[in-house]
Amino acid sequence: MRKLTDLPAWDRLFRKIVWAQLGEIRGRRVLDFGSGEGITADHYAADNDVTAVEPWDEMLKDAWRDHEYRQIVGGVEALTEFADDTFDIVICHNVLEYVDDKSAIVRELARVLKPGGFLSLVKHNRYGRVMQMAVLLDDFDKANALLGGEDSAASKFGRIRYYDDVDIQTWCPELMIEKTCGIRAFWDLQQNQEKHPDELWQEEMMKLEMRAGEIEEFRDIAFFHHLILRKKN
């Protein structure tokens, strides 16, 4: 069985924070759109009916499959097989930054989401990236470029096209932001990397991150934002 400790320290902490912010989920029909290696899909498949959609089949060669879930290889077009109001919960984590037509994807995710259900959306936060560049990486040129509205890049997935939290509601008025949490307000500034894999250290950092993620001032500079968007009844 795969374990979270198999993941790099930063990824392990990230997922534990996101899952804790979501709380307990049982007996629901869940869609994980942009599921990657299936880590989140596999986690929720232990107690839920999960469908995972991932366009890049390269990501699936070493997918996590300790629990049974349906895996679809494809993009937003794959959702056309599902009727309106199919899923209780839709998960879309670190996906929209890498696509051009964000609004079309959001509307399709909302279409297959049941009224009263929620979309869990994790996104890069521009100002957290500025903090990382200026403080951790000592790259003033990139920090200033980001402040000026330029995009940045991820080593694995390419260009990061930033967007604002409120854009989701503009693209799809059916969805209303119910809650916004910060993720990794401190991790990317903590430079004692030898401690990062230690489980006890991670527990203490997670407690602090969970508290700070609820505070506006820390949320504003967190590396990621986690939005819970409820579909109107």
Image (cartoon, rainbow, N blue to C red):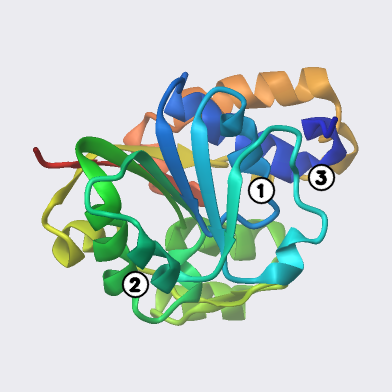
| Element type where label 3 sits in the image | loop
Question: Relative to residue 168, is residue 159 drawn left or right?
Answer: right
Q: Does label 1 or label 3 sit earlier along the sequence?
A: 3
117 lies above or below 162: above
Q: Quadrant of the N terminus?
A: top right
Q: Nearer the viewer, residue 178 or 34?
A: 34
Farthest residue to the right: give it. 194
Q: Quadrant of the C terminus?
A: top left
Which residue position is annotated with label 1? 38
| Element type where label 2 sits in the image | helix
Residue 28 picture location, percent across and down: 40, 28
| Element type where label 1 sits in the image | loop
Q: Does label 2 or label 3 sit earlier along the sequence?
A: 3
Q: Amino acid at mark 1?
A: Gly
Q: Amino acid at mark 3?
A: Pro
Residue 25 picture location, percent across and down: 45, 23
Q: Residue at x 53, y 35 (%)?
A: 18
Q: Residue at x 55, y 76 (%)?
A: 152
Q: Amino acid at mark 2?
A: Lys
Residue 179: image quadrant is top left
Alpha carbons under labels 1 and 2: distance apart: 22 Å
Which residue position is annotated with label 3? 8
Alpha carbons under labels 2 and 3: distance apart: 29 Å
Question: Relative to residue 225, is residue 179 drawn left or right?
Answer: left
What label does residue 213 carry, if any?
none
